[in-house]
Amino acid sequence: MFLKSLALAASVSLAALPGLAADQMIMVDDAYARASTPSAKSGAAFMQIMNMGETEDRLIAASTDAAIRAELHTHQEASNGVMRMIHVEEGFVIPAGESLSLQRGGNHVMLIGLSDPLEQGETVNITLTFENAGDVMVEVPVDLERKPQAGAHGGHGGGHGADHGTMEHKTN
């Protein structure tokens, strides 16, 4: 009986954490958003998403009031060597017990048509929609000073910290 009570208390505690869907055990960590300049019309959000559950899940959409639309994007190298961003309509699979990195130069949430500039120290509310876990709301701090993580591809025009005009955008 004690173990059942302890397990119930732990699941209730976990459910109270921001960015965590208790039923599917999706946890979001280390989230931040950036825009290239104060007048930028687009920005991006990055984070670590952990699937603590026993079944695979898929991040299928994102939404926010901070932009006209939010899309799941990745970078792809064209045959001419130019990196371009593409909308990943099918989303991103997160196997059971594994993580998905949304990082600069890779998979990310693209914020298109920002309502207001992304300003240092503010937060942006983003709802991530998962195939199984449903909606998970994440408060994403704006960090315009953060440097790319080791291994992130920031050298092809600077990733999301630089001018988006140097990179193609494609929506499938």
Image (cartoon, helix red, strand yellow):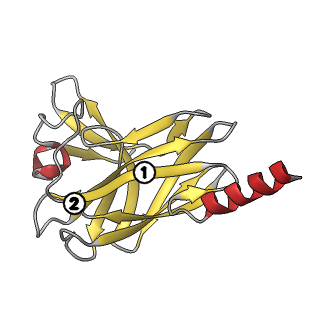
Q: Is residue 87 above or below residue 67?
A: above
Can you name the residue that lies furthest to the right here? 1
Which amino acid lies under the numbered mark 1 shown in the image of this protein? Asp
Give left or right: position of 55 versus 88: right
Q: Residue visible at 54% across and 37% down?
A: 93
Q: How many marks?
A: 2
Q: Position of residue 69 (x, y in %)?
A: 38, 65
Report how far apart the C-alphas of labels 2 and 1 lie in the structure.
14 Å
Q: Nearer the viewer, residue 9 or 44?
A: 9
Q: Nearer the viewer, residue 150 or 70?
A: 150
Q: Position of residue 113 (x, y in %)?
A: 27, 68
Quarter of the image for residue 121 reads bottom left
Q: Are marks 2 and 1 in contact (CB under 8 Å)?
A: no
Q: Residue visible at 11% across and 69% down?
A: 38
Looking at the rendered structure, the secondary structure element under dot 2 is: loop
Give left or right: position of 80 versus 28: left
Q: Is residue 15 above or below residue 67?
A: above
Looking at the rendered structure, the secondary structure element under dot 1 is: strand
Can you name the residue that lies furthest to the top here? 79
Q: Position of residue 46 (x, y in %)?
A: 33, 50
Give left or right: position of 66 versus 62: left
Give left or right: position of 30 versus 155: right
Residue that mark 2 sits on: 143
Residue that mark 1 sits on: 29
Residue 90 seen in render: no
